[in-house]
Amino acid sequence: MNNNKTINQGMCSRVSIVIINWNNWRDTLECLKSVFKINYSSFQIVLVDNDSSDDSINQIKDFSQHIPVEIAEFDENEIGRADVNGTDSSKEDPESDFSKKLILIKNHENYGFAGGNNIGMDFALEYLNPDYVLLLNNDTTVDEYFLDELLKLAGNNESVGSVQPVLLNDSGETIDSLGQECYWWGAEDICMGSPLKNLISPNSTVNGIDGINGIINDMEIFGSCAAAALYPTEVLRKTGLFDEDFFVELEDVDLSWKIRLCGYKSFLAGKALVYHKRGVSGSISSPDLIKGMKKDSMVLKWHRQSKNWLIIVLRYYPRSVIARAVLRYPHKVFFTFFRLIYSCIWLKKTKETFKILNYNLKSRKKLKHNPRWDAVWRKWIKKSPRKCEK
């Protein structure tokens, strides 16, 4: 699909690539191997380990010796000091101290996707002075030209807030994500789980798909899936990073809303390819509840899904859309609240959760003062997910 192999390093934008590892060093090393083979050279990797209990740290160190690349290793308690092992953020070119190094940050606990990435992004913004920050899941592998394609699109649009590649499953046969979309009661990755061959057929009806030439075109999307997403540094400084109340799931949707409300846009780079091992996840059914009543992991998944979605609704959705959702998706609305209440009681998180939700209910008042909010929700909140088919 990538017919244009032009190397676009004229401006040599500096990119900090942030990758999170948690008890999954095999996928992480596979990801790193693919990144070190890309055609773009002006990047540095910030690898954040979320307190892995396996042999991740030793495996990563051993891997670095075979690249070879020098590791700059930090404990999380060292981050935030004015001088990190002799590196002063006030220097004109802080990146030079970490040239050709793999930066490894070791956390003392698992801060989730949101918190772990925030630690990596904070380090990059403070000490590496990047033009862009690229978030990359550790269960991805990348095409040789993916970063060049992302940067070309970003560099051609002054209003860009984020850019994501075409995310495929690891076999390259199925779409994992063509970007984010919001609808009346949910947020999904566009065309997730759809066979790629269906989308590039001559009879394709999906926006952004050029069936005749067999490619996916660059197109504007609501927001970028953070499994592989490029953010300009100046945008992150204005929007802030991930909200750590999300821990995992939908934190990237929240960031996409912030990007939109700050006046920026998000895009899909159709020629940039990244392969993601994530499976197509479905919702937890009622039989699952019966079978898994004693499984904290399953109940915790319920809790995060329902709590995080309600945070999005309370922050950004107008009352009119919520009312329509109740009428069109009464079962989804019911189960959102059922799962939240059930999981809060089971996990003993009732007080903590409703404190978070109450805070977000009050914070939505700020939207009335944002002149972009009305236009954003009217354009990007759809009635239902788009259909990806021939």
Image (tube, rainbow, N blue to C red):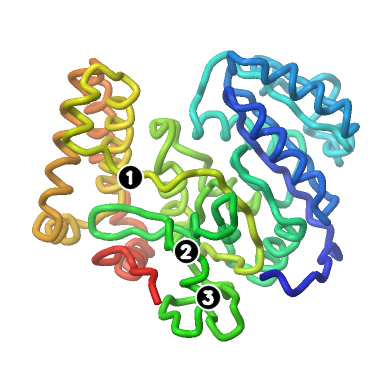
Disc nearest the viewer among 2 and 1: 2
Q: Position of residue 132 (x, y in %)?
A: 69, 51
Q: Which residue is mark 2?
A: 195
* Residue type beneath disc 3: Ile
* Residue displayed at 28% across by 47% down: 364
Q: Which mark is residue 282?
A: 1
Give the alpha-carbon distance from disc 3 to disc 2, as whole Å: 9 Å
Between 151 and 196, the one lying in front of the other is 196
- Determine crowd level at label 3: few under 14, some 14-19, many 20+ residues with C-alpha closer than 10 A: many
Q: Which residue is mark 3?
A: 200
Give the alpha-carbon distance from disc 3 to disc 1, as whole Å: 25 Å
Tag 2 or tag 3, which sits nearer the N-term?
2
How many dots with numbers? 3
Q: Which mark is residue 360?
A: none
* Residue type beneath disc 2: Pro
Quarter holding residue 106: top right
Quadrant location, the N terminus: bottom right
Q: Position of residue 165 (x, y in %)?
A: 60, 59
Q: Position of residue 6 (x, y in %)?
A: 82, 71
Tag 1 or tag 2, which sits nearer the N-term?
2
- Determine crowd level at label 1: few under 14, some 14-19, many 20+ residues with C-alpha closer than 10 A: few
Left or right of 125? Residue 114 is left
